[in-house]
């Protein structure tokens, strides 16, 4: 057994897993996106506040694996202060890259983050 606690994970993944940024919900959110991964059953919910087509605040709740929590955390950091169009262009690869990579068998976890962003933006547009 390796004594490396990080295993295949980068320092950044561990950091965002241990101390997730923007975890929680936004009571008066302008939109919410909820997505699930049918393969593992993990669920991610993303709350956003929007002002002048810009994401002012983003928070998440994720019931899922460590990689899903780390990517949720990083995704909220990446979409904050971005326009809705810019945010919708944030790919799961970009989120994984910002975390200095994910092991190949954990890339699917980052897809949840991208889908949650898409779902929240869709929800916002539907509401308007
Ligand atoms: Fe389900 Fe990571 S194993 S999102």
Image: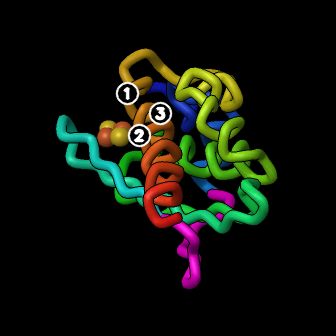
Most common secondary structure along the magenta stretch: loop
Q: Residues within 10 Å of mark 3 (few under 14, many from 20)?
A: many
**Magenta-colored span:** 19-31
Q: Quadrant of the N terminus?
A: top left
- Identify residue for label 3: 110
Residue with the most extreme front position: 128
Q: Dots 3 and 1: beta carbons under 8 Å?
A: yes
Secondary element under disc 1, as helix, strand or loop, is helix
Residue with the most extreme bottom position: 27
Task: Give left or right: position of 29 versus 99.
Answer: left
Q: Position of residue 124 (x, y in %)?
A: 52, 59
- Please report the residue visible at 54 percent of the width from the left and 48 percent of the height from the top: 72
Q: Residues within 10 Å of mark 2 (few under 14, many from 20)?
A: many
Q: What's the image's color scheme? A: rainbow
Mark 2–mark 1 Cα distance, whole angstroms, equals: 7 Å
Mark 3–mark 1 Cα distance, whole angstroms, equals: 5 Å
- Identify residue for label 2: 112
Q: Dots 2 and 3: beta carbons under 8 Å?
A: yes
Secondary element under disc 2, as helix, strand or loop, is helix
- Please report the residue visible at 57 percent of the width from the left and 34 percent of the height from the top: 6
Asked if the beta carbon under badge 1 is closer than 8 A to the nearest atom of ligand 1, the reply is yes
Against 83, residue 99 (above or below) is above
Task: Give left or right: position of 80 versus 46.
Answer: right
Asked if the beta carbon under badge 2 is closer than 8 A to the nearest atom of ligand 1, the reply is yes
Q: Is residue 21 magenta?
A: yes
Mark 2–mark 3 Cα distance, whole angstroms, equals: 5 Å
- Identify residue for label 1: 108
Quarter-of-image position of residue 54: bottom right
């Amino acid at each position: 057994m390796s004594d490396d606690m990080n295993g295949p994970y980068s320092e950044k993944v561990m950091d965002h897993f241990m101390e997730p940024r923007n975890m929680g919900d936004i009571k008066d959110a302008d939109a919410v996106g909820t997505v699930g991964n049918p393969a593992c059953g993990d669920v991610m919910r993303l709350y956003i506040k929007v002002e002048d087509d810009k994401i002012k605040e983003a928070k998440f709740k994720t019931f899922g694996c460590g990689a899903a929590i780390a990517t949720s955390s990083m995704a909220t950091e990446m979409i904050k202060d971005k326009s809705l169009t810019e945010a919708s262009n944030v790919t799961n690869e970009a989120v994984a890259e910002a975390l200095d990579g994910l092991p190949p068998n954990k890339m699917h976890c980052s897809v949840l983050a991208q889908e949650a962003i898409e779902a929240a933006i869709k929800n916002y547009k539907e509401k308007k």
